[in-house]
Image: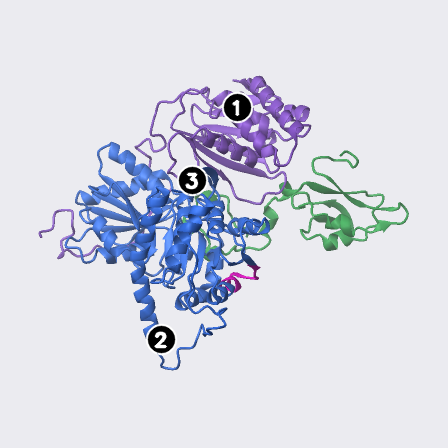
Chain colours: A green, B purple, C blue
């Protein structure tokens, strides 16, 4: 049962859970921190070897998998820390790594 | 000494202990709790008793600096001021609010500004994110950094007709003059033109002083050009 | 006469500036919101060579106060700053500093204590330390924060006092808001605070002494506490004298309790800190309507000015004490309990009611001040004063 906080602005002292306990887990998922970014990760699907290192290291669990493949980043929760880009290993076939950090607000790499 | 009516007689039983609450909605004020002097004029005429300004910006656009220099300008005019940034995580680009009070008399109140007379919006993308018009006084003014014409913005914001909506392309002016998208100095130029809340020349003098700590004369001149252009180009609806 | 400069700056910057002008020999500090900018600014002054202070960066507030105690016992003039959880963390050292009679001056940015975590203003941190034996001064504005800090140094180091002093200012409201204030020139402040002449300094190796001793099993602990009691009671006279001297120097008044409209008030609010300004603003408007409202601001909380309060409140018909801290389990907040006690021996029993407000930085709206005065008017007109406290301004 999801904790219903839709009327939190109307709550009185008695309506808040005792001792500020949050009676469910994982509700940080509902908090959109994407607006904090100044850079975002861009992943080149061709270059990506699906090693999953970015998924392992992301501190915000913002790398989205489908099965065992990285498909996307969760831009609602990615704070732009750059750890994924830092950990992404160089793909010898292309001579570069799959993830690079680009300025927030541009969708394609190279648009600086 | 006999007790008068308003004192509790010593033989009366104590009322029971209870914890009461005075909570929202808060009691409606019967006093003009915000204004001591009700007569006000704008456009550089005699200062009203108290002006309250709310700034909306993204961290890194210079709102806090602008609020600080405006406060210093008020000080030079022998006025009293309070300037308070809203404390929070200040990542580059995160929406921030700052508040300023300016008055001819010492300011003794320390509560939050609920009904600003002036709202300054340094980044128009905030209009979708934050309610920039919240609480604005009926005869207030809102100054926005935008290319859109003032009348269009006014209807988009949905404010009362008595609210002045002033638009100036502060970012464009900044990019032309200072060569950076830091719209804080031009927007203060526009603020001065629309509201007269501070004196333009005093502001420019203090701006020069603040800038000279880190920048050369060229930057100061560029900022002056930005301020002057915004002063001229601001349109009001 | 000093030359005064009018500045627009934050309360924290003014406290740091006052500290610089008092030139402490040692500062051991640890940052915590909202006092960090005090010790940060001071560190900048040290780096710029504008003050010659041994700046000790420690790993916690407990260590900060420990280092301050050691430095002060060594014979140094010592200052520091803290807030909320930091003040709570150094709790045992507060009692030690007072028991060792060390004239440490500490600025406290009044901030709510956890839990739940809150970084905004209330008085729970300082009220939790009110029994430690420190002298406590409270500032309403940035100007008072500057003035109180300078006055604190003189009070602490006075030979009849030799007690640590806390100079308190409201977190964010006073610490972070740019305000207009006047600062004095360095020479005048230096002349006012003078030199510190420590007794039994540890660094005086020609006359060795021992500090921080055990009073023995069944030893004279009680007697040492009496020494402290005598000192803190005597400090009231010193506070007033030093305050009056500072007032003469700066042109700004200083009094242990500062009244507005109290000469003929029917209804009065007793309050500490920045809220006094809000209350005064509303009282002014009420006076314009013919209501005899008054505000009594407590500027010195320890030693508690019971006589002065009783004298100021005599003749008032209804009193509201506003507490920005709770004393959970007691009948009311800490200021209420002490005010009521101060009024106990008056020949007339005046109804006193308690409002708890502003906890965790809850905004002190002017409507709430009005509501308090309106309740007081009802009581003054004959309504029964309620027993028990009122939470003013919760959601």
Q: Which residue carries the number 1 mark? A: B201
- Pick out the residue farthest to the front: C206
Q: Which chain carries label 3?
A: C
In the rendering, at what x and y percent does residue B104 appear?
Answer: 39, 29
How packed mark 1 is, by other alpha carbons closer than 10 Å (few <14, some 14-19, many 20 or more), is few
Give the CA separation, mark 3 to mark 1: 27 Å
Give the CA separation, mark 1 to mark 2: 67 Å
Q: Which residue carries the number 3 mark? A: C3
The first of marks 3 and 2 along the sequence is 3
Q: Which residue carries the number 2 mark? A: C221
Q: Does the magenta stretch include residue C88?
A: no
Q: Does the image show residue A85?
A: yes
How packed mark 2 is, by other alpha carbons closer than 10 Å (few <14, some 14-19, many 20 or more), is few
Residue A109 higher or lower than B8, as above or below:
above
Q: Which contiguous range is marked in magenta?
A: C56-65
Of circles 3 and 1, which is in front? 3
A96 or C288, which lies in front? C288
Q: Does the image show residue B158?
A: no
Q: What element carries label 1?
A: helix
- Is C102 situated left or right of B190 in this image? left
Of circles 3 and 2, which is in front? 3
Q: What element carries label 2?
A: helix
């Amino acid at each position: 049962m999801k904790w219903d906080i839709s009327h939190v602005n109307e709550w009185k002292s008695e309506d808040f859970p005792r001792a500020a306990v949050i009676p469910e887990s994982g509700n940080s998922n509902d908090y959109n921190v994407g607006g904090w970014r100044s850079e975002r990760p861009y992943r080149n699907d061709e270059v990506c070897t699906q090693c999953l290192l970015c998924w392992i290291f992301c501190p915000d669990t913002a790398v989205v998998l489908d099965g065992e493949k990285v498909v996307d980043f969760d831009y609602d929760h990615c704070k732009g820390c750059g750890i994924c880009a830092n950990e992404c290993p160089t793909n010898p076939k292309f001579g570069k790594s799959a993830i690079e950090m680009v300025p927030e607000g541009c969708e394609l790499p190279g648009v600086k | 000494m006999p007790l008068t009516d308003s004192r509790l007689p010593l033989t009366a039983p104590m009322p029971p202990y209870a914890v009461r609450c005075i909570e929202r909605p808060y009691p409606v004020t019967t006093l003009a709790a915000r204004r001591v002097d009700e007569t006000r004029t704008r456009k550089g005429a005699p200062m009203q008793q108290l002006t309250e300004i709310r700034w909306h910006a993204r961290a890194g656009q210079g709102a806090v600096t602008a609020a600080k220099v405006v406060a210093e300008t008020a000080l030079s005019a022998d006025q009293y001021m309070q300037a308070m940034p809203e404390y929070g995580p200040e990542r580059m680009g995160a929406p921030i609010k700052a508040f300023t009070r300016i008055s001819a008399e010492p300011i003794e109140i320390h509560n939050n500004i609920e009904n600003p007379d002036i709202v300054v919006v340094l980044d128009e993308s905030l209009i979708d994110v934050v309610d920039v018009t919240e609480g604005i006084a009926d005869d207030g003014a809102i100054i926005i950094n935008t290319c859109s014409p003032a009348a269009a913005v006014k209807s988009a914001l949905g404010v009362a007709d008595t609210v002045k909506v002033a638009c100036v392309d502060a970012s464009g002016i900044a990019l032309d003059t200072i060569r950076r998208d830091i719209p804080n100095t031009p927007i203060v130029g526009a603020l001065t033109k629309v509201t007269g809340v501070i004196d333009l020349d005093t502001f420019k003098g203090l701006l020069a002083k603040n800038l000279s700590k880190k920048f050369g004369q060229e930057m100061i001149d560029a900022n002056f050009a930005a301020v002057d252009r915004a002063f001229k180009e601001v349109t009001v609806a | 006469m000093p030359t005064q400069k009018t500045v627009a700056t934050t309360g924290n910057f003014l406290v740091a500036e006052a500290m610089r002008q008092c030139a402490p020999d040692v500062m051991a500090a640890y940052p915590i919101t909202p006092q960090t900018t005090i010790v940060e600014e001071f560190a900048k002054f040290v780096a710029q060579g504008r003050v010659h202070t041994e700046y000790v960066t420690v790993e916690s507030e407990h260590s900060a106060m420990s280092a301050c105690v050691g430095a002060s016992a060594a014979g140094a003039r010592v200052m520091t700053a803290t807030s909320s959880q930091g003040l709570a963390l150094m709790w045992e050292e507060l009692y030690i500093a007072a028991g060792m009679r060390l004239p440490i001056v500490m600025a406290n940015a009044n901030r709510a204590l956890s839990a739940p975590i809150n970084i905004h203003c209330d008085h729970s941190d300082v009220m939790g330390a009110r029994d430690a034996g420190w002298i406590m001064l409270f500032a309403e504005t940035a100007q008072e924060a500057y003035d109180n800090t300078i006055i604190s140094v003189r009070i602490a180091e006075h030979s009849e006092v030799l007690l640590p002093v806390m100079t308190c200012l409201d977190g964010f409201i006073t610490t972070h808001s740019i305000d207009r204030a006047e600062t004095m020139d360095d020479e005048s402040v230096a002349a006012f605070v003078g030199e510190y002449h420590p007794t039994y300094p540890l660094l005086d190796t020609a006359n060795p002494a021992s500090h921080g001793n055990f009073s023995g099993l069944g030893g004279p602990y009680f007697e040492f506490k009496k020494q402290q009691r005598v000192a803190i009671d005597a400090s009231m006279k010193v506070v007033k004298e030093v305050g009056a001297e500072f007032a003469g120097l700066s042109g700004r008044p200083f009094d242990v309790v500062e009244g507005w409209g109290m000469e003929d008030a029917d209804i009065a609010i007793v309050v500490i800190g920045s809220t006094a300004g809000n209350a005064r603003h509303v009282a002014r408007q009420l006076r314009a309507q013919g209501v005899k409202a008054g505000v009594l601001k407590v500027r010195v909380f320890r030693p508690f000015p019971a006589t002065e309060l009783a004298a100021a409140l005599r003749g008032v018909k209804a009193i509201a004490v506003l507490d920005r801290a709770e004393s959970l389990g007691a009948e009311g907040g800490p200021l209420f309990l002490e005010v009521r006690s101060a009024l106990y021996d008056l020949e007339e029993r005046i109804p006193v009611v308690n409002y708890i407000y502003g906890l965790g930085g809850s905004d002190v709206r002017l409507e709430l001040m009005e509501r308090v005065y309106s309740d007081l008017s009802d009581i003054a007109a004959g309504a029964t004063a309620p027993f028990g406290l009122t939470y003013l301004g919760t959601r």
